Structure formats: C-alpha cells, structure tokens
Image (cartoon, rainbow, N blue to C red):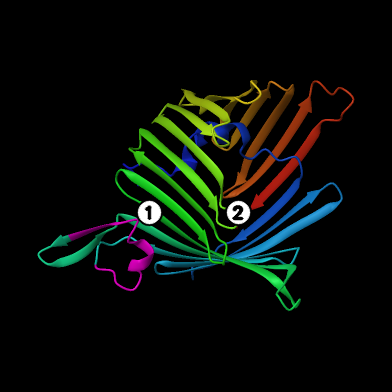
Amino acid sequence: MANGPASFSEIGRRARDLLTKDYNYDQKFSLSIPSSTGMGLTATGIKKDQIFVGDISTQYRSGKATVDVKVDTYSNISTKVTYDVVEQKQQSASMFLITSLARLTNSRGNWTLDCSELHIFLYALYGQEQVKDKNDTAYPSASISLDVHYIHHHAAINSSIGLNPSPLLEVAAAIGSKDVAIGGEIGFDTSSSSFTKCNAGISFNMPDFSAALILADKGQTVKASFAHLVNPLTGTEVAAEMTHRLSGYENSFSIGSIHKVDPLTLVKTRFSDNGKVALLSQRQWRPNSIATFSAEYDTKAVNQAPKFGLSIALKP
C-alpha cells in the first residue's frame, strides 16, 4: 500500500537493485506480446557459453483472477493462479485460508473481514524429473504450494506452504510505515523439523535516501546498505552495501552508481572489494524495448578475459 510498509523482501532492495539489477554476462533475448483481451505471451532465451535455455510464458487476467503458465526447455511446466481480495465484505468460503492473516470485526451483529489488500496464490510445478511410489512406479515430479499475501496500513505479511505430506513453511512479516519498517522471516522444513531460514531487518526510506540493516543466514551475517539520490535532475544515485560474517570475521563491500545520460539512456558502475569492476549501459531505443550491455573485469585475475553480456527485450 502507498502509506504502509512493503514486504520483508523489499528491505534493502533499493541499494541491492542499483548494485545488481540488469547486470548480465550472457546473451539474453526476450519478446513480450501484450493483448487487450487479457492474454499476454512472453518468450525468453539465454545463451550461456554453448548452452541455450529458454521458456515461454503466458498470462491471462479475468476480473480478480490471474493465471500464469510457463514452460521451459527442460519440459518443466509451472502454473500460478492469483486471486485478489481488495473489498471489505463478508467472506465465508475462503475464511479458513485467511482467518489468521486478517482481522474480524463485529459491527451491529454483522461479521466483516477488514482486509485492505489480500492476494492468494496457488503454484503448481510439473517437472520432467520422475519420482517413485511405494510400489516402485515412476511418475513425473510435481509440487504445489499455496501463498497468501496480506497488506494492511501498518503491516505486510507473506506466507507460503507446500501442499504435500512434508511441506516447507515460510512466513515473512513487516510492520511500520512507508518510511520506517521492521520485519523478519522464518522458514521451517517439516520433513526434517528444522529451520531453513531465520532473518530480520529494519529499513529507513525517504524519497532521496534509503538505508537498511539486515541480520541474515540465521544470525551469522550482518548486511548494511544505503542509497542516496545525489541529483534528481540527472537521476544520479550512489549506493553501497557492506557484509560482515560473524562466524569468520570476514568483511566484504560493494559500491555503485547510476547516472542518466538522457531520458532514454543510463549508465551504471560497480566496484567490489574482491577487485571486480562492472559497467552497464542501457538504452531504450523504442517504447518498452530496451537493449542492455554489461561488462565485468577482475583486476586480480589479469590472465582472465573480461566478461561481456548483451540483453535485448522487445515489447511491441
């Protein structure tokens, strides 16, 4: 929501995107074909060395429901069904899905669900890899998970659970406002009765400044990041991220910048403590069609050739 906090995954994202987003050292091509009828089609191909991988995805929208289907070169088929609930009204059929995430109020004898914004996702993945049952009969692997995203004026909660006998449960929550937010996330594997993740973070966001502090890797890593808009007219912005590993007392950092040469062209730079220098140039050569060139050079490996990448995204 505009005045509420973003989800936990958004903590530190402004600096993270400036330092990592759109950097690509392979050859990538994507074509998106929108449709006014609610059906869209996207084809993506990536060439990594001598290997080519790709996928075709389609999206269909109808009212509050959205269906996404993706098929890749490994014959994996994934499906996502999304249903948005944005009205305050009485719910009955889906109450068992959202009772723990929304607030029930009683006004003059009528129970209503105070639900500022609720998204229900159903994921299904059908893979080529096979699994065997107790009779040693092989079947293609498949997995289904249910996600519920709830956004309120002062809270954002995301939860996911696998619909199988030994599901993986993940819950992330953030409270606060659009300026200050604090949150955490946990993951629990019921098959091994162990926690897969346990992270926490806090963020401060302003139009020209953003800072975040994250405790990750089950308390073993501390990440601090900031981003500052230097010149709003040219879009010049700088960002830095520092990582400290408590177990090994290791430190690492990256600094980067972005600058808009003109309304259609931007340039990004990045330098890391491991000696790697990266450069990115992106040009919107027609509406919704972008060409991106990336390069990276390792100053500590003088005998290693620099990496180059080209990405072209077309959207007629």
Q: In the displayed structure, does residue 305 sit left or right of residue 283?
A: right
The residue at which mark 1 appears reads as: 150
Residue drawn where x is 40% and y is 49% of the image:
157
Residue interval drawn in magenta: 90-105
Residue drawn where x is 47% and y is 40% of the image:
10
The residue at which mark 2 appears reads as: 192
* Upstream in sequence: badge 1 or badge 2: 1
Q: In the image shown, does 129 or 181 lie closer to the viewer?
A: 129
Tag 1: Cα neighbours inside 10 Å, few (<14), some, or many (≥20)? many
Residue drawn where x is 69% and y is 29% of the image:
279
Residue 214 x %, y %: 50, 31
Q: Quadrant of residue 32?
A: bottom right
Residue 117 x %, y %: 34, 55
Q: Is residue 59 above or below residue 206?
A: below
Q: In the displayed structure, does residue 117 sit left or right of residue 233?
A: left
- The residue under label 2 is which amino acid type? Ser
As measured in the structure, the alpha-carbon distance from the residue carrying label 1 to the one carrying label 2 is 28 Å
Local secondary structure at mark 1: strand
Q: Is residue 185 above or below residue 210?
A: below
Quick one: quadrant of the C terminus?
bottom right
